Image: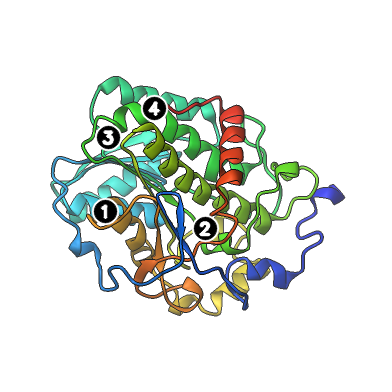
Amino acid sequence: MDKKNAVGRGHSRRDALKLFGMVGGSLALHGVLGGVPTFAWANTSPGWQASDMPSLTGKRMLVTGGSSGMGFEDALALSRAGAQVIIAARNSQRGAESIERIRAQVPDARLRFEQLDLADLASVRSLAQRLNAEGEVLDVLINNAAIMAPPQRGVSRDGFEMQLATNFLGHFALTGLLLPSLQKSADPRVVTLASIAVNRGSINFDDLQSQNNYNPYVAYAQSKLACLMMAFELQRRSLANDWGIRSVAAHPGVAVTELVERGPGLESEFAREWAKDRDVYHSAAQGALSSLFAATAAEAEGGRYYGPTGEEEKRGPLGLAKVPDAAADADAAARLWSVAERLTGVRYG
């Protein structure tokens, strides 16, 4: 491997694990509402469960990565509540299987699968064009799909570092392109998934694509921090431009999903450390609660960040998540937004 892209170069194993709260570290304690930092955080609905969702009959919702993990749990819970759900993912076979699994539990579920590769902007544009051409309302977009910490630096079809492309740039483009369908809704929401890794993340504008130094965990934290900054900046721009979008961020804590298997791998040091506490982490269904709350609860506010409130937010009851200083930096978010517009060719509004 090229030395400049060596996994973990310049970072100790302990540093990598700190990104995910597996060893101690300090966290900022403030939230954001409508772009204005607030210094109070508390449980908003500590006992909230998926069964508390209102009826979603007549609502149309899209979940990226809805064929597995928390995306699947989102699609299942939304279907139970009566929503029409679009599962957007890469693998059509897995998509068909996920629809069968949901219909086995919710026989009258209104589901469909749409092909989407977030690491291919042509695929993102194609999906947006298909949905916008239908002329129907899109009430909620849940930007859920993600990849985590592949050992080797990958490059998307468009030439971007794979985690940045999939987790952030693809969702940035999809959200902007779907604005026409979202704005047909009386209460449009965009829910964007972040991660507890954002608490140790930073945006490296000088090496955004990790060309000079690729560390899989650092690149993951950057991509998820970018997602959180996007969620806050979208809320600010929605208010400033009267787009009517309620942009809400969420994170699952640490949930047992396929991310580790598909990313660093089950034989990695990260996976072995993660496995020590596997039994006490959230299930995928528990991890999905924060995004379901953000997508459906009347009290979920635009510009807020929701997640577990237990130890280091790895698990626990639902509440306001802690926002790191980097995510609350409006100037950096505006700069990142401009970079994303240039890289994707998508301009909002």
Is mark 2 in CB contact (under 8 Å) with mark 3?
Answer: no
Contact (Cβ within 8 Å) of mark 3 with mark 4:
no
Q: Secondary structure at mark 3?
A: loop
Please state the horizontal and vertical placement of residue 70, each as a whole percent of the image. Answer: 38, 57
When the figure is inspected, residue 100 is found, relative to residue 279, above or below; the finding is above
Q: Which residue is mark 1?
A: 76
Q: Which residue is mark 3?
A: 138
User: Residue tagged by mark 2?
Assistant: 259
Circle 2 sits in a helix, a strand or a loop, which is it? helix
Residue visible at 37% across and 52% down in the picture: 71
Q: Position of residue 197 (x, y in %)?
A: 57, 62
Q: In this orientation, does residue 335 appear?
A: yes
| Of callouts 3 and 4, the N-terminal one | 4
| Residue farthest toward the top in the current orientation of the protein | 133
Q: Nearer the viewer, mark 3 or mark 1?
A: 3
80 sits to left or right of 165: left
C-alpha gap between disc 1 and disc 2: 19 Å
Question: Circle 2: is it few (<14), some (14-19), or many (20+) Cα within 10 Å?
Answer: some
Nearest the camera: 213 or 321? 321
Mark 3 packing: few (<14 Cα in 10 Å), some, or many (20+)?
many
**Count of number-bearing discs:** 4
Which of marks 2 and 1 precedes in the sequence? 1
